[in-house]
């Protein structure tokens, strides 16, 4: 896309140059026709110089191409990597189930099942819309304009748009279906604009990060749904304090003159601390949905699965972003 734009912008400037240089090419052609055989013969006789340089360059370029073709993974190696990824996800699910979910509860009531399923339907639909919109924005060149803009302006606009649309989803009553879905679509559009620069990464990294995220969120939500009632609801306060620390560590390099060691510590807190905090939020949000389902069944609160889905969607997006960063860092270390 950038290449097409550059060629389209440069093309009008190249046309007048070619037209102006056209009438002056005849004498050069006559000169080159007389001198060309002697120049070629001299270049053939000299192994060093321009001829040797071009020969060595051609050989080196062929060597680079051959090495790139040799180091390209085969289909068996690609399937092996996907098998290792799937085994890691399956092991995560089994391990989380074995260590975190020892005290299980009875089966969910029909009201709890319906409320939880509706919340996950909105979560999955919002993630699909966010991914499609982010891909479309990337193809339209939005990430280039984001990187060329003021970072504080981008941060302010994204925060205002995301928080404003999220508050619209929270405080719009479920009876007002049109306005509530409009705020929900605006929230997903704001998330898509924020996530569109992730498509600069390799599709292999994005697919593996998505698979890891689905495994982590699926296992933790299953643990939260099958654990005893209100077992993880106590984590709300500590998780809120943890997400505050993660947010401040993410914004610290933009506001404070940190050294290399300070930047490394802030990045580690934002990356691995955020991964732990938002994984805990999956447990908390799942049990909160079930608690609200019981309250809605008694008529204490209105039934609003779209509101519950916002928290799960934010948890998955934040885990996915950190998975992408971890996989990208691992790829850079291997190089």
Image (cartoon, helix red, strand yellow):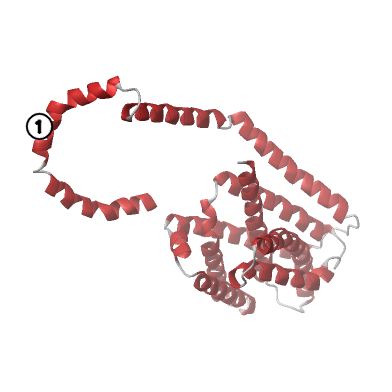
User: Residue at the location (71% across, 72% down)?
Assistant: 244
Q: Is residue 41 visible?
A: yes
205 or 35: nearer the eye? 35
Q: Nearer the viewer, residue 315 or 287?
A: 315
In the image shown, does 228 or 167 lie closer to the viewer? 167
Please tell me whether residue 192 is drawn above or below residue 16 in the rendered image: below
Residue receiving disc 1: 30
Whether residue 305 is visible, yes or no, is: no
**What residue is drawn where x is 66% and y is 48%?**
211
Q: Residue at x 52, y 58 (%)?
A: 197
Q: Quadrant of the C terminus?
A: top right
Q: Position of residue 311 (x, y in %)?
A: 68, 67
Q: Position of residue 252 (x, y in %)?
A: 64, 70
Outermost right residue? 103
Q: Where does the image place residue 99, in percent across and percent down from the top left?
A: 87, 52
User: Is 80 on the left or on the right of 155, as rendered?
Assistant: right
Q: Is residue 117 left or right of residue 20?
A: right
Residue 59: name its quadrant.
Answer: top left
Judged left or right of residue 295, residue 30 is left
> Residue 54: x percent and y percent?
35, 29
Look at the picture and state if 202 lies above or below 38: below
Within-10-Å neighbours for mark 1: few <14, some 14–19, many 20+ = few
Residue at 85% x, 68% y is 230
Task: Report helix, strand or loop for mark 1.
Answer: helix
């Amino acid at each position: 896309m950038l290449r097409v734009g550059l060629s389209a912008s440069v093309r009008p400037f190249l046309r007048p140059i070619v037209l102006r240089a056209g009438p002056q090419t005849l004498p050069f052609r006559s000169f080159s026709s007389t001198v060309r055989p002697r120049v070629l013969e001299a270049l053939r006789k000299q192994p060093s110089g321009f001829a040797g340089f071009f020969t060595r360059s051609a050989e080196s370029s062929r060597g680079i191409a051959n090495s790139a073709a040799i180091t390209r993974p085969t289909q068996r190696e690609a399937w092996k990597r996907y098998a290792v990824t799937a085994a890691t996800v399956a092991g995560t699910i089994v391990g989380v189930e074995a260590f975190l979910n020892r005290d299980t509860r009875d089966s969910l009531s029909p009201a709890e099942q319906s409320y939880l399923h509706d919340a996950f339907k909105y979560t999955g639909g919002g993630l699909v819309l966010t991914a499609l919109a982010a891909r479309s924005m990337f193809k339209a060149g939005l990430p280039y304009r984001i990187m060329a803009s003021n970072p504080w302006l981008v941060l302010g606009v994204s925060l205002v748009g995301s928080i404003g649309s999220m508050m619209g989803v929270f405080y719009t009553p479920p009876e007002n279906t049109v306005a509530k879905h409009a705020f929900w679509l605006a929230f997903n559009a704001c998330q898509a604009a924020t996530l569109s620069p992730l498509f600069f990464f390799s599709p292999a990294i994005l697919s593996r990060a998505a698979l890891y995220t689905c495994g982590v969120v699926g296992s933790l939500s299953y643990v939260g749904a099958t654990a005893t009632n209100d077992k993880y609801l106590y984590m709300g306060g500590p998780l809120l304090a943890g997400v505050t620390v993660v947010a401040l560590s993410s914004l610290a390099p933009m506001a404070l003159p940190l050294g290399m060691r300070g930047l490394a510590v802030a990045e580690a807190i934002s990356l691995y601390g955020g991964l732990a905090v938002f994984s805990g939020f999956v447990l908390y949000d799942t049990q909160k949905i079930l608690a609200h389902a019981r309250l809605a069944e008694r008529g204490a609160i209105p039934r609003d699965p779209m509101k519950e889905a916002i928290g799960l969607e934010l948890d998955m997006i934040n885990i996915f972003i950190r998975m992408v960063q971890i996989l990208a860092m691992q790829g850079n270390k291997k190089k």
